[in-house]
Amino acid sequence: MRHDAKRALAAIVGDEHVSDRMADRICYSQDCGPDKAGIPAVVVRPKSTEEVSAIVQWANEHHHSIYTRGRATTFLGSGVKDDVIMLETTRMDRIETVDLDAGYVTAQCGAIWHGIDAVLHRDGWELAVPGGGGLFSCTIGGTVAVNAIPHGATEYGMTGDHVLSLEVVLPTGEVIKTGSAANPSSAPIERGSNGPDLTGIFIGAYGILGIITSVTYRLRRIPEVELFRFYAFDDYHDAIDAAGGIQAQAASTFVVALFGGPKPAGETGDAFLHIIVRDRVVAAEARIREAEAICASHHGRSRSAEGTRRYWEDHMYSWLRNTAPGPYYSDRPYFCPEVAGFVSTNQLKHAVAIFREMKAEREEEFAHYGIRVKGLDTYFARNGAYLWIDTLYDERREDAYQYGLKLRGDIAERMFTEGGMSPGGLGAGVAPYIMPKLGETYAFLRRLKASMDPNGVLNPGLLVGEGDLK
Ligand SMILES: Cc1cc2nc3c(=O)[nH]c(=O)nc-3n(C[C@H](O)[C@H](O)[C@H](O)COP(=O)(O)OP(=O)(O)OC[C@H]3O[C@@H](n4cnc5c(N)ncnc54)[C@H](O)[C@@H]3O)c2cc1C
């Protein structure tokens, strides 16, 4: 298949944008996470929607599978199979329209999140969310495809909430636009027009239902000020109650909590809240005073917010723990399987307790395999919490690797069943533990996938197990 595919794909995108060299194929097999994946047969890098459509049509005719990749910054397992066509979108990086009057930007799927923001900043505007922690490298298409949880989620919500329209190449190669932009004479104003919200089925679908080729996204004016606070709590229940109070009063743009992992340098306490407010000057001051009062009423101790400021301005996790990026990010050879998902703010207490309990129960195993807890961190969303559970293992040890992946599955299982957590991140690593538990919802997703992608061309096996399609 390799040589035929290379020739056919080169006829679509040009010789220089197709490779079947082993070195390239290996580099394109994995994401940022620890899961091992298959090796694609050929890598193709289209430049336009027309080229994507032609590739998908060819793959359908010849019954080959395609795996779509942006910048591979997910940690959750790419699920790439051996011998697939790897379609990489980073040449599709054009910003197509900036309309400040209508408040939207349209960009090709491979444009980098922060790159789009940098262009908007010149005019005092920004994307409606600042992006997730991968914002300096992730593509807008990949970020919408996973519905990443962004910085600022406490006020701004999820990445997908601000998508106004998508252009999508369906698994058959047809091209559609969603929302009001489906009307050829209309602008992309809202996605809930021209019938049901078709945009939504591609958000968080991990590319199994179509390849997003262009995204139209809402803008906001850059707020006048950003204010920062940092609080330490001696009991994590108080920290969660304080965060819940801030949510109820809409007193902050972003609240991030730390319940485990290394404590911020120089701090004592059981849990910590980083608080960020972005607004007009008067409103921001009123909101930060309210957040301060809420934290104080829950026994919070106000501490230096310098780490909070650096975290927000640099979007570097290291500063959540008052640590410079160098030492934090060079913590190799440890590798990190992650479980992440939504719980209600109240259930978060239970979820944190479950993980602390699991850690205590497995103390000997953790010591034996050298497992470390990197973080038990939470982004508060508008009406709930998004908990990241990051455990590290020593990647030089095969037994620790196997234990680390098993541990991730066990955590996902317990959090889903006992902790009330619904995973936000669902790559090849966690999906097999969770999707079959969704019952009729999973059955419906399988039927949807089978009817939209009858030849199983796009991202085979991801979210919906291949065997499950039959
Ligand atoms: C340092 C760091 C911090 C991070 N912080 C966060 C965070 O705060 N919040 C968060 O949610 N995530 C975070 N992530 C994860 C990551 O940033 C997101 O998953 C990312 O936005 C995905 O974009 P990508 O271009 O890398 O997509 P990829 O990883 O290449 O792809 C992700 C999935 O989407 C599919 N896909 C990619 N492009 C398309 C497309 N055009 N159409 C259809 N499907 C497509 C792929 O097949 C794959 O299944 C972080 C990552 C890093 C490295």
Image: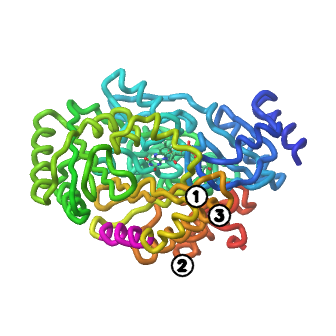
Q: Quadrant of residue 226?
A: top left
Q: Which residue is mark 1?
A: 427
Q: Is residue 106 visible?
A: no
Q: Nearer the viewer, residue 203 or 340?
A: 340
User: Mark 2 and 3 residues: CB-CB less than 8 Å, in contact?
Assistant: no
Residue 221, above or below 347: above
Residue range in magenta is: 347-358
Mark 1 CB lies closer than 8 A to ligand 1: yes
User: Mark 1 and 3 residues: CB-CB less than 8 Å, in contact?
Assistant: no
- x and y percentages locating residue 352 in the rendered image: 35, 67
Distance CA(mark 1)–CA(mark 2)? 19 Å
**Which residue is depicted at the point 21% across and 49% down?**
231
Question: Magenta: predominant secondary structure element?
Answer: helix
Q: Quadrant of residue 316?
A: top left
Q: Secondary structure at mark 3?
A: helix
Q: Residue furthest top?
A: 122
Front: mark 2 or 3: 3
Q: Earlier in the sequence, mark 2 or mark 3?
A: 3
Q: Secondary structure at mark 2?
A: loop
Q: Which residue is mark 3?
A: 402
State left or right for residue 458 relative to residue 356. Answer: right
Q: Residues within 10 Å of mark 1 (few under 14, many from 20)?
A: many
State left or right for residue 192 relative to residue 292. Answer: right
Residue 318, above or below 443: above
